[in-house]
Image (cartoon, rainbow, N blue to C red):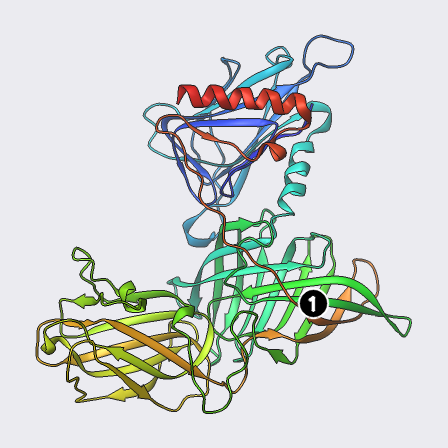
Amino acid sequence: MEPVFADFSTTPAQLSNAVVGYHRCGVAPSHLAVGSDGYIKLDFAVTPTEGRGEAAEAVLTVTTLGASVPMDVLLNGKTVAQGVTFAEAGGHDAPLGTDVSVDRVLSLPGELLTPGDNLLEIRSPAGEKGLLRVTAVTVDPAEDIGRARRALAARASTRSVFAFDTEQRPLDSAVWQPASRLLFHLDRGDRAVPAQLSWRGSDGAETAIALRTDMSGFHGHHRSADGALGEFRGVLTDRWAYPDGTTNGPLHRFSTEEGRAGDWRPSGELRILLDDGRGAPVERVTWTDRRGNAASVTLTAAVPTAGTGAATPPGELRDVTDTIIRVEASDEFEAGGEIARNLLRRSRSKWLVHDNTAELDFTLRSPAAVASYRLTTANDCADRDPRNWQLQASHDGGTWTTLDTRTGEGFTHRFETRDFVFANITSYRHYRLRITGNAGGDEIQLSQVQLLAGADKAPSATAADFIGYYGAAGESPTGYRGTTVPGPGSDDPGEQEGGPREKLLAADLTDTAQGLDSAARLLGKLAEYLRTS
């Protein structure tokens, strides 16, 4: 019997030897939520036991998140279990309101299995108020329980780029507060998944986390640049196979060597991507993986990140507006199409807010030392022009520093562009234009905002080298060093769409099927689902 699994903890779902359909379910980033009278159908194949015509007994494992919610299990139309509940996962403080994973194991009798196609149904009873949140389903032969889980783990190891939504709780506080997204990727070419990870930023901030076995979340602690302490936790939202998901992150690639017996010997490539959204470049990373290997590296010299151009000579500014990946406004006239995103376009569109004060927040792809900005007035109503404002900056989007203050400024005509220059040599990732007054009207508007940066005091780019140590499990540690090599990137994968009624989850057939016979069977099943949905 080939491994059968459906992993709903990622989008799209990861499948093997299976086609999955569902009804009255919601697709969440980390699970499939089954509502009242909803179901998941898993169509899989079983080969007959050698020497006999019937299939052997199998074992079903359903992994869920959270509290006790009943479920019914049917195999080929016959009830295997009814009203089965999952034990409460008590005593755990799980991230962002999620719950600890719980496995429920059921026997699938051999007399109910048929050689060839089989249909497994996991149902939520009609009238059930709770959601059955399923993260994975596996089916194993009784004589080799865990085979599908091992195959799933092997498949998952190729998806080594992780993104987490995070929260932090200050010391002695009972309230968790939203924090920046965490994105990371660590790979020495051995596909070993991290178990513990810590890092230090160039601003002195430090973070350490321990990851769940299934990588669905983490818990740790953080010390900010100003010394404030707090807890730190997160829940997995995306997971990709490298290089997907790395396009906009500070990816470092190194050609490495290990020091053994007095000689430095080549030891392959190391890739590091670690972006906690706080703005300061990472200067030290330490980790252990699931196999017990441990490493720590300190990044030394730096060179400009690929794609950002050469270092800016002193006194010379470069336009970094094109590196803005997000702009948010305190308000905008969405119905009229006069939104904040228009400020980044080289056109005569505009942003309008129905108030005489406003804020605009800009997030850059990577930190830059902005030392000048340009404001362009809109098409009409001069009394809507900004008159008093501040330009502020932040490493983490939470603590702001005022870089420039203007009062009593004026513009003489429509679509006029004015430059405002100030002194700054520190790189920040977040910038805020805080408008505190206009020219007398009840609204504020602008046509364009541009940010220009100069050379910063510590280039926040790709590290040129690292030095550190590496210790394989059960062996003595060795010296470890590396030199930068260019790194590729690609856009994040698009989202999968489903049909209007019973929706279908299916991975690439090259991953789903083993051999031409399985591929042909699954193609037929896919066609059948498409005809009936």
- Name of the residue lying farthest toward the top: 53
284 vs 459, left or right, is right
Q: Circle 1 sits on which residue? A: 254
Which quadrant is home to the C terminus? top left
Which quadrant is home to the N terminus? top right
Quadrant of the rendered structure where residue 286 is?
bottom right
The percent coordinates of residue 96 (x first, y second) are: 42, 53
For this rendering, which residue is in front, 459 or 24? 459
Q: Residue at x 64, y 23 (%)?
A: 518
Q: Residue at x 23, y 71 (%)?
A: 447
Q: Residue at x 21, y 64 (%)?
A: 331
347 vs 386, left or right, is right
- Name of the residue lying farthest toward the right: 261
Is residue 301 depicted above or below 274 in this figure? below
406 vs 250, left or right, is left
**Which amino acid, by three-letter code, is at mark 1?**
Phe
The percent coordinates of residue 373 (x first, y second) are: 33, 81
For this rendering, which residue is in front, 302 or 357? 302
Q: For the residue labelled by badge 1, is the local secondary structure a helix, a strand or a loop? A: strand
For this rendering, which residue is in front, 61 or 511? 511
The percent coordinates of residue 101 (x first, y second) are: 53, 42
Q: How many marks?
A: 1
